[in-house]
Amino acid sequence: MAHVLLLEPNRVLAQTYDRALQSVGHMVSVAFSAEEAIQAADRLQPDVVLLELHLPVHDGIEFLHEFRSYPEWQAIPAIMITNAAPQAVQPYAGVLKQDLGVKKCFYKPRFQLKQLLKVVAEQVAT
Amino acid sequence: MQDSADKLQGGSMQLLYSVAEQLKTPLSIISRQAELDKLASGVADPDIIHTQANTALTLVESYLLGLQLAQQQTALALEPVSVSSLLVEVAHELDGFAKQYGVGLELQIAGKYEPVMTSRPGLRAALLSVGYAMLEGDLSQDRKLSLAVHKTPHGIVTGVYGYYDQLHSRQWRQALALQGQARQPFKGLCSGSAAGLYVAEAILQAMATRLRVGRHLKQQGLATTLLPSQQLQFV
């Protein structure tokens, strides 16, 4: 159905999301760092990006700034799944939504996989 | 005296915050795996659920042990401990977790070492806590960690090591100061909140020792020094 670029530094969580996405027919490229994600996107352009805000070395906002600097990737929707508490993300909400193309932000302890799959399907359809 | 009490409580709150943040990860994994099983039967991995649950329980138990030892609610029962045999036990417990995170785990226990007089449950909990933290947030150059023991003039040194860019004691001191405050307090060693390192430090402090940046052969990591027991000597 769609090519999903998954940027999640925790390998076990990444495997879990990967299986959920594949179970509904998506193709998934998994990256554990911002650098790996850029390389993966270069190999095959994704239709949607899922990412954690808290990354080793660089954070998700830095990654998105670099990702959006490539003209061909500027319109690709991004969905955030993060351990950062909502009150910590709130100050960046405007930048994330308007400048960095983040369509939805999930808080890891409270979201469900079926919500994620629904949002991915919506973003791929638009 | 009030200042010391306030400082102790402040430190305890930071540790609790760090542990609470860390627990989000295994609990999120368990929850998502359970949901995955509902979405697509047979796709979830029961080994992941089991290992992550054990990791979370170990972190909680180790945290409580450190707290109890610090508040002297639990007596520090000392006994002669073979560090080599304890490392075998710790490696066995970490093995499944290491495999899930794709990190190789080696034992480097060659040689004969006198037993050390220490709290076996305390040392075990400390080594497990360090192991889990370094495995989950692994930033080693070759994705391999070692559980090792060696002897120095100061005592028997044991810890968890890997190949990193130069680690300094200063970085560990900074990480201790950033406990519960920074997202990645010890970036040179592992990503994440590193709660396991703080839990280990709390336990070891109650055992009159500490974690330090150390070397084993060409690897670096975190280790503690223990005094050999004078009561028993292996021949």
Image: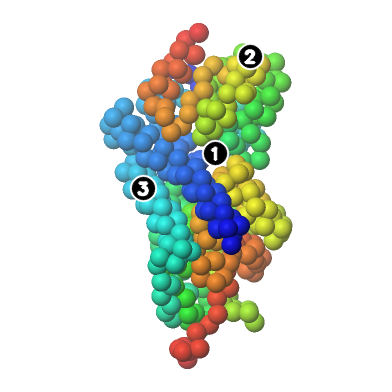
Of badges 2 and 1, the one in the foreground is 2
Q: Give a yes or no on whether discs 2 and 1 share a subunit.
A: yes
The residue where tag 2 is placed is A98
The answer for how far apart the CA atoms under marks 1 and 3 are is: 19 Å
Residue B85: give x, y in percent of width and height: 43, 74
Q: Chain of mark 2?
A: A
User: Which type of secondary structure does the marked residue at label 1 adopt?
Assistant: loop
Q: Residue at x 50, y 88 (%)?
A: B230
In the current view of this chain or complex, which residue is farthest to the top?
A: A126
The answer for how far apart the CA atoms under marks 3 and 2 are is: 39 Å
Q: Give a yes or no on whether discs 1 and 3 share a subunit.
A: no
Work out whether B97 lies above or below B126: above
Q: Residue at x 30, y 33 (%)?
A: B37
Q: Which mark is residue B53?
A: 3
Give amino acid for label 2: Gln
Is B132 placed left or right of A67 in the picture?
A: left
User: Which type of secondary structure does the marked residue at label 2 adopt?
Assistant: helix
Q: Which one is nearer the viewer's eye here, B10 or B117?
A: B10
Work out whether A12 lies above or below B179: above
Q: Which mark is residue A9?
A: 1
Tally the numbered discs.
3
Residue A35: give x, y in percent of width and height: 65, 35
Dot 2 crowding, Cα within 10 Å, few <14, some 14–19, many 20+: few
Residue B64: give x, y in percent of width and height: 42, 57
Q: Residue at x 48, y 80 (%)?
A: B117
Whether residues under marks 3 and 2 lie with C-beta atoms below 8 angstroms apart, the answer is no
Q: Which one is nearer the viewer's eye here, B188 or B194?
A: B194
Q: Chain of mark 1?
A: A
Q: Which one is nearer the viewer's eye here, B33 or A110?
A: A110
Residue B39 visible in the snapshot: yes
- Indicate the quadrant where residue B172 lies: bottom right
